[in-house]
Image (cartoon, rainbow, N blue to C red):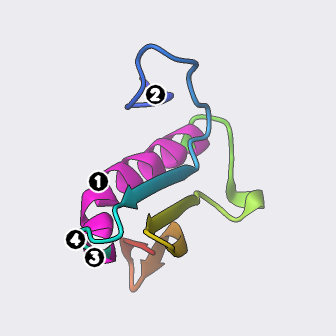
């Protein structure tokens, strides 16, 4: 079973989920808190892309799974690309 989107059960499904945006108020807890709050959804979307690729929708020619992550607090913006990386035989997920 492949989930098309683990987050929105009522709307149109996403086939290759690739973007997460997180906003905090200008005097909010900061970008570190944004990263902590979105780490599990980012990992989940990367895993969904890996599973889709393994089951016949290969992403390897496009560079592999990728999730864009946009965080903003007040007027400050940070944009990151998140992807799986294999080093020394171990897979990790990087931002």
Stretch in magenta: 31-53
Across and down, in percent, residue 43 comes to: 37, 55
The span from disc 4 to disc 3 (Cα, nearest Å) is 8 Å
Instruction: Give the labeled residue for mark 4.
Output: 29
Q: Dots 1 and 2: beta carbons under 8 Å?
A: no
The span from disc 3 to disc 1 (Cα, nearest Å) is 14 Å
Magenta-drawn stretch, dominant element (helix, strand or loop): helix
Across and down, in percent, residue 78 comes to: 51, 75
Kind of element beneath mark 4: loop
**Considering the image in quadrants, where does the C terminus appear?**
bottom left
The structure residue drawn at horizontal position 46% and vertical position 27%, both measured from the top left corner, is 2
Instruction: Give the labeled residue for mark 3.
Output: 32
Question: Residue 44 colored magenta?
Answer: yes
Kind of element beneath mark 2: loop
The span from disc 1 to disc 2 (Cα, nearest Å) is 17 Å
Question: Residue 49 colored magenta?
Answer: yes
């Amino acid at each position: 079973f492949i989930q098309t989107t683990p987050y929105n059960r009522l709307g149109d499904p996403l086939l290759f989920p690739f973007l997460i945006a997180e906003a905090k108020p200008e005097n909010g807890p900061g970008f570190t808190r944004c990263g902590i709050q979105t780490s599990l959804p980012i990992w989940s979307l990367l895993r969904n892309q890996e599973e889709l690729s393994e089951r016949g929708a290969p992403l390897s020619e496009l560079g592999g799974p990728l999730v864009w992550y946009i965080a903003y607090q007040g007027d400050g913006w940070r944009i990151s690309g998140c992807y799986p990386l294999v080093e020394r035989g171990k897979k990790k997920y990087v931002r």
